[in-house]
Amino acid sequence: MHDFGAKGDKVNNDRTAIQSAIDACAKSGGGVVYFPPGDYLTGTLRLRSGVTLFLDAKATIWVSRSPEHFESERYGHLILAENERNIAVVGSGKIQGYADQPLQRRERGDFRYGIILFEGCHDVIIRDITILYSDSWTIHLKRCEKVLVEGVTIRNNYDRINSDGINPNCCKNVRILKCDIVAGDDCIALKTTEPYPCEDVEVRDCVLETRATALKLGTESHGIFRNARFSGCTIRNSTVGIGFFMKDGGIMENIIFSDINIEPRATPNARTFPIFMDIERRHEDSKIGFIRNVTLQRIYIRTGSGLLIQGMPKRPIEGLTMRDIKIDVVRAEDYSERRKHIGGNRTTSDERDTLYARQPSYVTIAHVKGLNIENLTVNISEDVHRKYERSALCLHEVEDGTLARILRKPPTGEELPIIALHNCRNITVAKCEALHGTKVFLGVSGRRTNKITLKGNRLRAAKQPVRVNSEVPKDSVILLTK
């Protein structure tokens, strides 16, 4: 690096010297551009095919504060690559931004920069580096294929809007492993800002913290999200743990979340959602998208708020499986002003903004076709139990489903049932047990209710095992002894 004139003193701008080293390396057939110990001040760098940037453990690349050192004087990127192959940014060194001060939530600033933007690239590796205080999307991967992001640490300002961590956008074959991210916006967000697929993505063993959503699909959702797997992650102090935001008419399908620990932040009026899933139109002329074939399994949640999953009346979520979900309710959070998490600019609004978000339940699910829940446990601390009465599970307008081994501790001693079904059709409740002290185990309401079947349950401890409201059509609830 020094052979090309880089000073590494954080005073002189080393952009020209570093770019010369990259270009010379590419011209010679590729190789490694090594950053020895030092502090390298620079603006935009363009990475070329076959070139690896290697940061020594005592090397730091500092983002220039001068907009003229970037290719755009409005939005800049530190490391750019377009349509390149076999590129990498690795090593134990740091990339240091200067967005360490908070902004107001809607303030953008005169000039904003991200750290890495790779567009249309193949065979990409980003490994082991530490990135501090990016001002915008930290690592943006757009229409890239065969990407590995591993062991990356990101520490952005928790109060800096748009400072996302890692955004695979219309990408294929992406692995994000063992990353540790604190961000002022979404930590890892799959996006389709264009009608191209984002598919075959694996996110594993990451630690995430953000004021926004930790693991997210959307909000930009113009294309297909397909075959994404998230596992082994720890989420803490986040507004939304797992989020599906379908707004722009795309498709989210074949998505699996497993072995996830979630402890969201405490907020007034319970504006947090450990898990949030929503279909809506961003604008009146937006198409209605699909969410289908989603599995949530082996998820532990410690919270004061509840899960919210809702499709649209015209477009229910299709094929949702929830298995081995444990919720420890440790705080008393008020639902009276609760609204669904919006996420992203939109011009539409309807009753679903608040209708289901304010239901007295720790798991609220609406407008789903094909729902299977097995082994859902809700443990409620004594202080919370005395302050708010809420069901473990509340379903609205759900069709074709099985509910098995649903347990709430302690049971309700008042009027709300453990499980509430409103206008649901073809639902089987099986292998559930009513604990001593349960007043109502299953509550059924709604004139569109049809074929609610109970079998293999142990409900004798409940004062009223099943309560059916008067508007429910006759013979809609079927009790089987076996």
Image: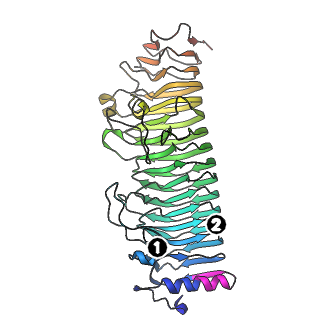
Secondary-structure class at tag 2: loop
Amino acid carrying label 2: it is Cys
Q: Residue at x 58, y 66 (%)?
A: 118
Q: Quadrant of residue 99?
A: bottom left
Give, as a single range, the part of the protein colored magenta.
Answer: 22-33
Is 81 in the magenta?
no
Q: Quadrant of the N terminus?
A: bottom right
Please, is residue 91 above or below residue 38 in the view? above
Along the polypeptide, which appears first: circle 2 or circle 1? Answer: 1
**Viewer-nearest of discs 2 and 1:** 2
Please, is residue 457 above or below residue 135 in the view? above
Residue located beneath label 2 in the image: 121
Q: Which mark is residue 95?
A: 1
Amino acid carrying label 1: it is Ile
Q: Going by the image, does 434 lie left or right of 145?
A: left
Q: Residues within 10 Å of mark 2 (few under 14, many from 20)?
A: many
Distance between the alpha carbons at the discs numbered 2 and 1? 21 Å
Residue 39 screen position, x and y as percent:
43, 82
